[in-house]
Image (tube, grey):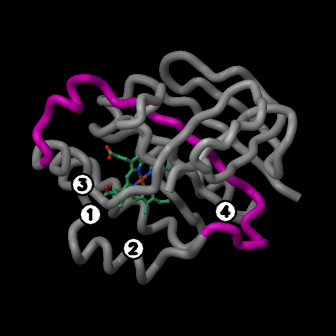
Amino acid sequence: MRFAFVGGKAGPWRVLSVTAVRGASLTPVTHLDLYPVAAGKLSPCGEWQLEGLISNLRYATRSEVANLKAAQEGLGRPAARRAALIPIKKSREWWSLAQDERRAIFEETSHHTAIGLTYLPAVARQLYHSRDIGQPFDFLTWFEYPPEHAEAFEDLVARLRATEEWAYVEREVDLRLERR
Ligand code: HEM
C-alpha cells in the first residue's frame, strides 16, 4: 500500500518543529496530512509530498518479530497525540554492502531493534520504504506516542543517532507533530 505525507497548510497534525539533522531540510510547513495514494488520483496541493510503501521486513529475525508483535501497539491510539515523521536517506556506501553486512551493522553492532523494543508499547511505529519508487528519501519513519512519553522518545532518537548505523545516514529531517 502506497501512502503520501503532504506538508502544507492543512491536515490533522500540527507541525511543532522541522529540524534538518543531516543534509538539506524540507520547507517548513504548519500542517501534515497522510493519505493512501489511489492509482490515478490527483494529489492534494501542499508545499511538498513524500511517498512510501508499507513493505516486508528485511532484517528482523523470527524471534525479533515475535518480540515486536508481543510488545507493539497500533497507530491511531487516541492518547497518542504526539508524532514524529523522520525521513531518512542512507549513503551509497550503505547500499553497496551485502544484506548480511547491513544486518550486522543494523542489529549486531547498533542494536537498533533491541534499543527500540525497550520504548514499546509507548511508541507505535510504521516504516515506509521510498527508495525503490524514486523518492528523495529511502525511508519515511513514523512514530506516535502520548505527550508524557515525549522525553523518552527524544532519548530513543539520540541513542539511535549515536550508533554505527547512523554513520551511513546522509540526509535526515526530523518533524515533531501534535494533534488535538
Ligand atoms: C520505537 C522503537 C523502534 C523500534 C522497535 C524499531 C524497530 C525497527 C525494525 C525491527 C526495523 C527493521 C525492519 C526490517 O526488518 O526490515 C527498523 C528499521 C528502521 N528503523 Fe527503526 N525502530 C524504532 C525506532 C526508530 C527510530 C526512532 C528511527 C529514526 C530516528 C528509526 C529508523 C529506522 C529506519 C530508517 C529503518 C530502516 C533501516 C534500513 O532498512 O536500512 N527507527 N526499525
Locate residue 37, reporting x and y percent.
61, 48
Q: Nearer the viewer, mark 2 or mark 3?
A: 2
Q: Residues within 10 Å of mark 4 (few under 14, many from 20)?
A: many
Q: Earlier in the sequence, mark 4 or mark 2?
A: 2
Mark 4 — residue? 145
Amino acid identity at mark 3: Glu
Q: Are marks 2 and 1 in contact (CB under 8 Å)?
A: yes
Amino acid identity at mark 1: Ala
Q: Are marks 1 and 3 in contact (CB under 8 Å)?
A: no
Q: Are marks 4 and 2 in contact (CB under 8 Å)?
A: no
- Does dot 4 land on a helix, a strand or a loop? strand
Front-most of residues 179 and 160: 179
Q: Residues within 10 Å of mark 2 (few under 14, many from 20)?
A: some
Mark 2 — residue? 68
> In the picture shown, does residue 87 fall above or below 58?
above
Q: Earlier in the sequence, mark 2 or mark 1?
A: 1
- Does dot 1 land on a helix, a strand or a loop? loop
Q: Residue at x 34, y 30 (%)?
A: 90
Q: Is mark 3 within 8 Å of ligand 1?
A: no
Q: Residues within 10 Å of mark 1 (few under 14, many from 20)?
A: some
Mark 1 — residue? 60
Q: Is mark 1 within 8 Å of ligand 1?
A: yes
Residue 171 - label: none
Amino acid identity at mark 4: Tyr
- Does dot 2 land on a helix, a strand or a loop? helix
Q: Residues within 10 Å of mark 3 (few under 14, many from 20)?
A: some
Residue 89 is one of the magenta-drawn residues: yes
Locate residue 178, reporting x and y percent.
79, 51
Mark 3 — residue? 107
Q: Are marks 2 and 3 in contact (CB under 8 Å)?
A: no
Q: Earlier in the sequence, mark 4 or mark 1?
A: 1
Tell me the distance, in whole angstroms, between the alpha carbons under discs 4 and 2: 16 Å
